[in-house]
Image: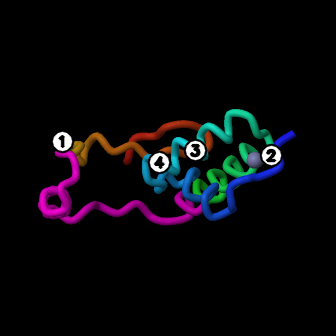
Amino acid sequence: MIAHHPSDELLLGAAAGTLDVGAAIVVGAHLEGCARCRASVHAFESAGGAMLESIEPALMAPEALARRARISQVAGWPRQRPPKPSACIFVRSSGPRLPS
Ligand SMILES: [Zn+2]
């Protein structure tokens, strides 16, 4: 029986995908064996999805990806190829949907 569980803050971070790599590995390993925490993460994901569905989609500022690239360069983050804005997909509970 599992005696210790990650905090709600960590589980929320796992649901949002905002944990650093180390925390994500530890929490992910815990989630493999803990139905209680998986249920919490699922609830956080559902709440986040509902919040996303309630807001109007907005276009990114034209310079947003270039700004993100400059921040990554200054911070020493791994270089990423930014996605094309036209490739963005809005996910709803009924499945993926392309922006209209
Ligand atoms: Zn747990």
Q: Please, is residue 21 above or below residue 33 in the view?
A: below
- Residue kind at label 2, given as amino acid type: Arg
- Residue kind at label 4, given as amino acid type: Gly
Q: Earlier in the sequence, mark 1 or mark 3?
A: 3
- Residue kind at label 1, given as amino acid type: Arg
- Residue at 43 percent of width and 47 percent of height: 21
Instruction: State the image coordinates of residue 89 (x, y, percent, origin top left).
Output: 39, 43
Give the CA separation, mark 2 to mark 1. Answer: 37 Å
Q: Earlier in the sequence, mark 2 or mark 1?
A: 2
- Residue at 40 percent of width and 60 percent of height: 57
Magenta part of the chain = 51-79
Q: Please, is residue 66 above or below residue 98 in the view?
A: below
Instruction: State the image coordinates of residue 90 (x, y, percent, origin top left).
Output: 44, 47
In the foreground, 8 or 50:
8
In terms of image quadrants, where is residue 61? bottom left
Q: Please, is residue 42 above or below residue 53 in the view?
A: above
Q: Which residue is mark 1?
A: 81
Q: Secondary structure at mark 1?
A: loop
Q: Which residue is mark 2?
A: 36
Q: Is mark 2 within 8 Å of ligand 1?
A: yes
In the foreground, 42 or 4:
4
Nearer the viewer's eye, disc 3 or disc 2? 3
**Dot 4 surroundings within 10 Å: few (below 14), some, or many (20 or more)?**
few
Mark 3–mark 4 CB contact (< 8 Å): yes
Q: Which residue is mark 4?
A: 22
Residue 75 belongs to magenta span? yes
Describe the colour scheme in one phrase: rainbow
Mark 3–mark 2 CB contact (< 8 Å): no
In the foreground, 28 or 86:
28
Q: Which mark is residue 26?
A: 3
Q: Earlier in the sequence, mark 4 or mark 1?
A: 4
Instruction: State the image coordinates of residue 93 (x, y, percent, origin top left).
Output: 61, 44
